[in-house]
């Protein structure tokens, strides 16, 4: 399901970036400390929790920063859609794989790298010719572990749902009708037209 949706978003977007977001040791510890405080407040000992629950609690706080980072990018004028997969590092700590789809205004690699202030990030542009392979690569992390978490833009990869807005139309129904007509035409030819 997510693989097909991601491939569609890659093909339909202006340009797609594939990235990895990691947290510095200090930020990982900050997330653990916030989780410890939360658990203590609820009457539990963070250190006594099963490893999977500790991961989920760390992810909860790291995910909040990922959300703030995406909001900062959007606030700076970039219309973006995304698929975000959280995976456990070999160390058991969370890190993130992301497909970031530009809709109108391009975003520069140095902007992506410098705006993520919680650790290291690596980025590369995805070729539309390799949309399915890239989508499979990102989505494989969903099946590697039961700890993997996924989050995406509303209506991610669903034609007719928010795609009009995503394509820059002020009326979401306008874009949905346009995409729907294009897909009917494409389906008649046996392929997806973008």
Image (cartoon, rainbow, N blue to C red):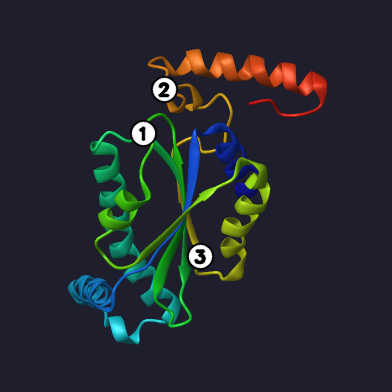
**Image height check: is 85 above or below 90?**
above
The answer to whether marks 3 and 1 mark residues whose Cβ atoms lie closer than 8 Å is no
Per the image, label 3 sits on a secondary structure element best described as loop
From the top left corner, tell me how far across and down residue 122 is, in percent: 41, 62
Residue that badge 1 annotates: 79
The answer to whether marks 1 and 2 mark residues whose Cβ atoms lie closer than 8 Å is yes
Residue at position x 58%, y 44% in the image: 6
Label 1 environment density (alpha carbons within 10 Å; few <14, some 14–19, many ≥20): some
Foreground tag (3 vs 2): 2
Sequence-earlier tag: 1 or 2: 1
From the top left corner, tell me how far across and down residue 119 is, in percent: 29, 68
The answer to whether marks 3 and 2 mark residues whose Cβ atoms lie closer than 8 Å is no
Residue 138 lies left or right of residue 29; in this view the side is right
Residue that badge 3 annotates: 148
Q: Nearer the viewer, residue 103 or 81?
A: 103
Residue that badge 2 annotates: 168
């Amino acid at each position: 399901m997510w693989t097909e949706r991601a491939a569609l978003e890659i093909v339909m977007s202006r340009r797609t970036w594939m990235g990895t977001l990691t947290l510095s040791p200090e930020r990982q510890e900050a997330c653990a400390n916030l989780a410890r405080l939360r658990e203590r407040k609820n009457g539990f000992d963070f250190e006594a929790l099963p490893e999977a629950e500790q991961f989920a609690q760390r992810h909860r706080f790291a995910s909040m920063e990922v959300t703030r980072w995406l909001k900062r990018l959007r606030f700076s004028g970039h219309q973006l859609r995304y698929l975000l997969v959280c995976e456990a590092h070999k160390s058991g700590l969370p890190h993130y794989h992301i497909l970031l789809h530009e809709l109108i205004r391009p975003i520069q690699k140095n902007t992506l790298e410098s705006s993520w202030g919680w650790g290291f990030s690596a980025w590369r542009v995805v070729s539309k010719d390799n949309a399915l392979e890239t989508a499979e690569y990102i989505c494989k992390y969903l099946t590697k572990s039961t700890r993997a978490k996924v989050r995406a833009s509303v209506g991610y990869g669903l034609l007719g749902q928010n795609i009009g807005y995503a394509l820059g139309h002020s009326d979401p129904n306008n874009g949905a009708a346009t995409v729907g007509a294009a897909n009917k035409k494409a389906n008649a030819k046996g392929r997806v037209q973008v």
